[in-house]
Image (tube, rainbow, N blue to C red):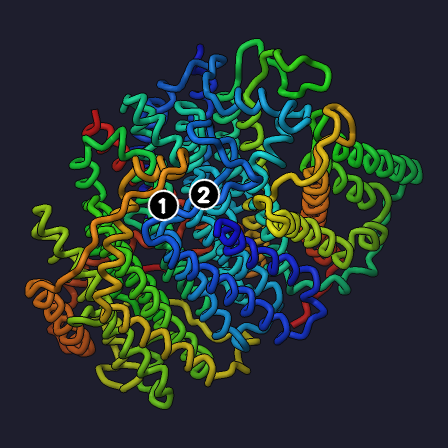
Amino acid sequence: MTRTMRLALFGVSVAGFAALLVWGVADLPPFGHYPGPYGDVIVKLSVPQRHMANAVTAVVFDYRGFDTMGEELLLFAAAASVALLLRERREHEVEDIVEPVRSDAISAVGVLAAIVTLVVGLDVVAHGFITPGGGFQGGVILAASVIFLFLCVDYRRYAKVGASTHTEPIEAFGAGGYVALGIAALATGLGFLQNFAELGVPGRLSSGGSAILVNWCSALAVSGGFLVIFGEYLQENMAERHGRRKLG
Amino acid sequence: MSVLPYLLASWLLVIGLYGIVSSRNLIHLTVCVSVCQSATYVLLLAIGYKEHGTAPVFADVPTSRRTVDPVVQSLTLTDIVVAVAVSALLLSLALKAHDHHGSLDPAEMADLQG
Amino acid sequence: MTWLLPLVAALPLLVAALLALVGKWLPHRAADVAALTVVAGSLVLALVVVARTANRLVLHWFGGWRPRAGDFPVGIAFAVDRVGAGFAALVLLLLFAALLYSWRYVEEEHYLYLVLMLAFGGAMVGFVLTGDLFNMFVFFELMSVAAFALTAYKVEEASPLQGAFNFAVSNTVGAFFVLFGIALLYGRTGSLNLAEIGVRLTNDGRHDGLVVAAFALLTCGFLVKAAMVPFHFWLADAHATAPAPVCVLFSGVMVELGIYAVARVYWTVFDGVLGEFQHPIRDVLLAVGCITAVLGAVMCGMQRHLKRLLAFSTIAHAGCFLIGIALLTPDALAGSALYVVAHAFAKGSLFLAGGILLVARDDIDELLLQGRGRGLHYAGAAWLLAALALASPPFLGTFTGHALLDDAASVEGYWWVPAVIAFATIGSTAAIVRSGARVFLGWGESDDPLLSEQPAESAAPGEQEASLALMQAVTIVLAVAGLAVGASTRLAARAVEAAHHFVSRADYARAVLDHQPLPPAPSATWHTTTLSVAWALVTLIGSFAVGFASLYRKRLPHAVTNALARALAPLRAVHSGHIGDYVAWLTFGTTVIGGLFALTIR
């Protein structure tokens, strides 16, 4: 089909498609007046039943923890896919590339930033059940802290820390750990992924029960997954920039 | 006005689809896929909003306080991870396609036909 | 009992993560054994669940969030009836066969291949077992991402990238439609549990724009996965380039999961509120199914790339599966289910035979392979047996599925549906017979004016040292299994009983939410009618006759072939390989289907 025909076909359909969408959303409850019971039930239960002050994290890791498991595995599969697709480029082809950042000031600030970001990331993960945060958000911040090394210091240092021999096990451990925790709960006679530990006091770091473990597994899986994906892209990029030829 | 955020979500979906259909660059196409994904975030979060509601975090707020829906926020988190996974995959495919064809134009990639 | 359910899905996923952790250092064969063992274990568990779901819904509430009777369900549930359990078992069985076949066939980054296959299989099992709508979406995405990557496995060639990219974008857009529909339903009912949404929609009673739009978006989104026209373009591209064992899963269960999802969502969520509109819904879905069946058969006959030929055959058969669902009766649904099982084995066997040809003869083009398949006796025999199974001969292969479908259609007054199904069967199976005769027997002319040109494909570098004996063994076993499905009338009777449970929304809801047991299904015995045997003979003789005749299409007078080529050219041109075209058609299809629903459901 030529471009004109394609756009014509789309143009003809999109009016009807948009009409279908508008017709559908017009009957939604008015913005700001959502009556749905699911949220209300969770909000009522999350503190008394689960001792979790952050209802969103309670939903993510406890009430709908199985969805989150599927999603960790999704990120894990994506990282494995990127590794599979970009496999022609091997890490050892580029591990000698340095590509330093030329300003000492930036390097110094960068290392500092990396450390601060690491601490912030760990803090966000740990306080997931008390304040906005949790495994996902914290995991992304943790990944960012490693990427600072590439941005502000040099590629070789980043490659040493973010090597796939580090990141892939972390990610696999996070994803697998999540599933294993679920099966462990099953083995003790509870439901899959059921919270089996002492729930603690709401608002304290110790609240959350065994969902704390699940939280940390997800932080590992997310940070590992991001670093695997980023690492693969960066390898390709470095190889291009430094004229490394592909083997075979 | 009470239907405006939902219309925004529909608009984002439609414009993202237009981007995909008219795209001449695989990277641009991947970003258009993300735009479509954003449409679903907007829709979900807009559905869960409650007027004068605060965040559903009770560390410093009594549990009787009106909050927005936490479930849609959790759904959106999942949705974001899905977007990351799909984008990562599409970008690596685009990378390899560029390796093979030297171009990022979908029209150049159409080897399998009929 | 309920503790078994999560393991069926979780065990393959756990081993996938473990293999990612240690796979780089494990010897190849150890990783293979680990994967095969866990799949076999899950399969055994799945079969136990099949046995226990005769008249019962097996439930598992994750996180221990089992609601007290009448309470709002806050957790996610696996809610498994016999159809779901059977599907899960089919997935695991095909996965086992595919992994066994890949023992040496797929060598590069072998552990990553296993990781993705296990993730793919585990996700499909989870998708089929779950009773939560958003959980369905999550597993849908997980199986999709794994599938995209597996399609592009042979990154050294250019066409797998096109196949994977088109597959990825099309299915992702379909997933957006599904998510939009889920959001709309959540806005109305405030729940994500299938049973609960169904109850709330039925009690609410409104069938306004929101409900119809949600139904249209959910259905179209899942029909993208099911490769219905005009959402089907990605399938041919993806199948042509993915490794053969992966294609087994694509054609055998992945496409069928889309159809399953349409049925499951309709029967648990929408049947109550849209139940009075069964006629228009039936007609629209029937139209989609019939158009797909016919188009698939026609395109199938024009292919010379064997895997692309098989892909269009899958599209044709998938159209027939949808016809069964579209009729909205339990008998038709049972027919589709049996048809799916027989088709999965037969089609799987054909793909594996194609893989053998690729490895042993380094080509997959029918004309270039003419006569070169002569030494591969088992592959040739499997090709014949599988073609026989698909041709629906009396009492073998897809016969029981076809018979149930034809009978159900006639009962509902759609007397022309058996003819459409027969056309689709003959058209697609004839192409398979033709290519088999040409490749394995060397018959026919060396050229055919109606076949589309395709880029060359050769075996990937790691594929040379394959263990041909094991590959051939798996291929033959699958072909025989495909034939055997049609022979069992007991299976047919059980399928009809299971279907009765599938279609009763109120019973499902009571079982999931109020812990009520399912009422026993009317016990069915199933008899073959003379009409169904007659149709079976028509498809059997037709497939082989047309198949052998089309070997000699070159001998047709030029005027005829030119006219045919000109008539078919627009159809061929539409399958352009360009993702922009595919998404434009996707939008068009959704608009038409949604528009038809909007006009008829008021």
Q: Secondary structure at mark 1?
A: helix
Residue farthest to the bottom, as pictured: C375
In this picture, is C418 found above or below C593? below
Tell which subunit mark 2 falls on: C
- Specify the amino acid type for callout 2: Met
User: Is residue C92 toward the left or the right of residue A131 in the image?
Assistant: left
The number of numbered discs placed on residues in the rendered structure image is 2
- In this view, the residue in front, C595 or C509, is C509
Q: Residue at x 59, y 39 (%)?
A: A65
Q: How many other residues sit within 10 Å of disc 1, few (<14), some (14-19) or many (≥20)?
A: many
- Kindly tell me whether residue B20 is visible in this rendering: yes
C254 or C374, which lies in front?
C254
Which chain contains the residue that carries disc 1?
Answer: C
User: Residue C136 got which mark?
Assistant: 2
**Within-10-Å neighbours for mark 2: few <14, some 14–19, many 20+:** many
Asked whether disc 1 touches disc 2, contact meaning CB atoms under 8 Å apart, the reply is yes
Residue at (19, 68) in percent of width and height: C392
x and y percentages locating residue C49 in the rendered image: 42, 56
- Residue at which label 1 appears: C261
Disc ID at residue C512: none
Amino acid type of the residue that numbered disc 1 sits on in the rendered structure: Ala
Kind of element beneath mark 2: helix
Q: CA distance from mark 1 to mark 2?
A: 9 Å
Return the x and y of residue C326 as percentages of the image width and height: 22, 45
